[in-house]
Image: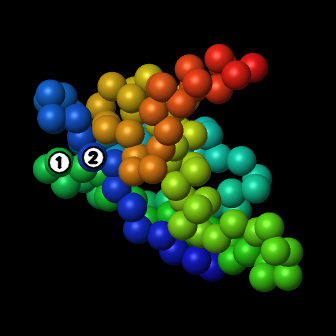
Amino acid sequence: MDCVYTSLRHRPEVPPTSAGEVAEVLGILWAHTSPEDGLEHISGSLDSDRVDLLLYFLSADPAPPAAHGPLHRAAALLARGHQASPTLQRRYLPPAGAPGPQADDARRAKA
């Protein structure tokens, strides 16, 4: 099992939220998990400017060369969850390395 520590940073203009914020973030991430992620467990804690997350993934089989490591899977899950959830978009800055709305516009223009 692989463990990844990551965070979602609050938007500066967003006021502090309720004590149920961590549970809501975890639920949103679980809702956007795919079987390919290999996610087994998530835990989180609230800090003044962010939600800290520990994501536990099944270790990838080292045989297939196309297997993505845990850091890639964590980044993809955060980006996918943030992109799909209005709640995460409203409260948190996009995760580091996540494509912005311009990337979606550029992809649509090419299609």
Is the C-beta separation of discs 1 and 2 under 8 Å?
yes
Viewer can see residue 68:
yes
Of residues 98 and 44, the one nearer the viewer is: 98
Image: 15 above or below 42: above
Image: 29 above or below 41: above
> What residue is shown with label 2?
9
Residue at (61% x, 40% y) in the render: 32
Under circle 2, the secondary element is: strand
Of residues 105 and 7, the one nearer the viewer is: 105
The Cα–Cα distance between marks 1 and 2, rounded to whole angstroms, is: 6 Å
| Residue 66 location (% of width, % of height) | 80, 67
What amino acid does circle 1 point to? Asp
Q: Between disc 1 and disc 2, whose residue precedes?
A: 2
Q: Residue furthest front?
A: 110
> What residue is shown with label 1?
49
Under circle 1, the secondary element is: loop
What amino acid does circle 2 point to? Arg
Residue at (51% x, 74% y) in the render: 3
| Residue 71 location (% of width, % of height) | 54, 67
| Residue 52 location (% of width, % of height) | 32, 58
The 10 Å Cα crowd at callout 1, few under 14, some 14 to 19, many 20 or more, is some
Quadrant in the picture for the C terminus: top right
Residue at (30% x, 31% y) in the render: 91
